Amino acid sequence: MSRNNNLVKYTIMDYRKISHFLLIGCLTFIIYYALLWICFGFAGLPYRAAVAVAYTAAIVFHFLGNRKITFNAGGTKFWHQVSRYMSVALLNYFVQLGIIGLCYEMYGINFYISAFFGVMSTMITGYLLMNYWVFKGGKL
C-alpha cells in the first residue's frame, strides 16, 4: 500500500510541477513576445538584436519564477543554480535563434510565428533539464 501511495504522491507532484512550469512559461512568453514587439516591431531593431533583448529579460523572470514556484528551490544553492540555468538558457537561445532564422529568413514565415516555433522547440527539454539538473533537490 505504501508503494502505491508514493506513486500517487509523485504523480501529483509532477502534475503540480508541470502546471506551475506551464504557468510560468506562459507569463514568460507574454513578456518575451511583448519585448519582441517593442524591439522589432516598434523600435525597428534587427531580429537578432530583438531576440537577444527579449530573451535576456524573459529568462530572468523565468529563472526566478521557476526557482521559487515550480521547483521550490528558493533557499538552496543560488549561484550553482544560476550557472546551470545559464547553460540551459544559452543552449535554448541558440536553438531558438536557429529556428527563428530558419523559419523567418529561409522560409519567409512571419517573424512572430517563427518566434513562437522557437519557443515551443525548447519547452520540453527546458523542463526536463531544469527538473533533473538545474533545480534538482528542490522541495514541493
Image (cartoon, rainbow, N blue to C red):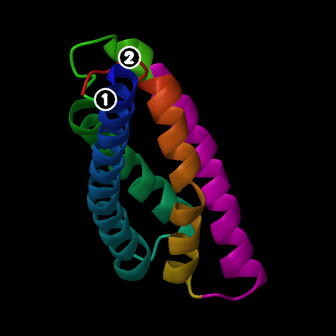
Q: Compared to 26, does 1 lie above or below?
A: above
Kind of residue indicated by mark 2: Gly
Foreground pick, 92 / 25:
25
Q: Residue 9: image x %, image y %?
A: 30, 32
**Residue 46 can be seen in this image:** no
Where are the magenta residues, as a range?
83-109
Rendering quarter of residue 12: top left
**Residue ID for mark 1:** 5
Q: Quadrant of the C terminus?
A: top left
Residue at 28% across / 12% down in the picture?
76
129 above or below 44? above
Q: Is 115 displayed left or right of 56 in the figure?
A: right
Answer with left or right where residue 72 lies relative to residue 60: left
Look at the picture and state if 75 lies above or below 34: above
- Tell me how far mark 2 sits from mark 1, CA to CA: 20 Å
- In this view of the protein, which residue sits in the foreground, 38 or 75? 75
Where does residue 33 sit, x and y in percent of width and height?
36, 70
Q: Principal SS element in the magenta part?
A: helix
Asked whether 54 or 116 is in front, the reply is 116
Residue hosting label 2: 137
The residue drawn where x is 21% and y is 14% is 75
Marked residue nearer the N-terminal end (2 or 1): 1
Residue at point 69% right, 78% down? 103
**In the structure shown, which secondary structural element does the residue marked by tag 2 occupy?**
loop
Q: Is residue 113 magenta?
A: no
Q: Mark number for residue 57?
A: none
The image shows a total of numbered marks equal to 2
Locate the N terminus and report the quarter of the image it occupies.
top left
Q: What's under tag 1, amino acid-wise?
A: Asn
Local crowd at mark 2 within 10 Å, few (<14), some, or many (≥20)?
few
Q: Position of residue 72 (x, y in %)?
A: 24, 27
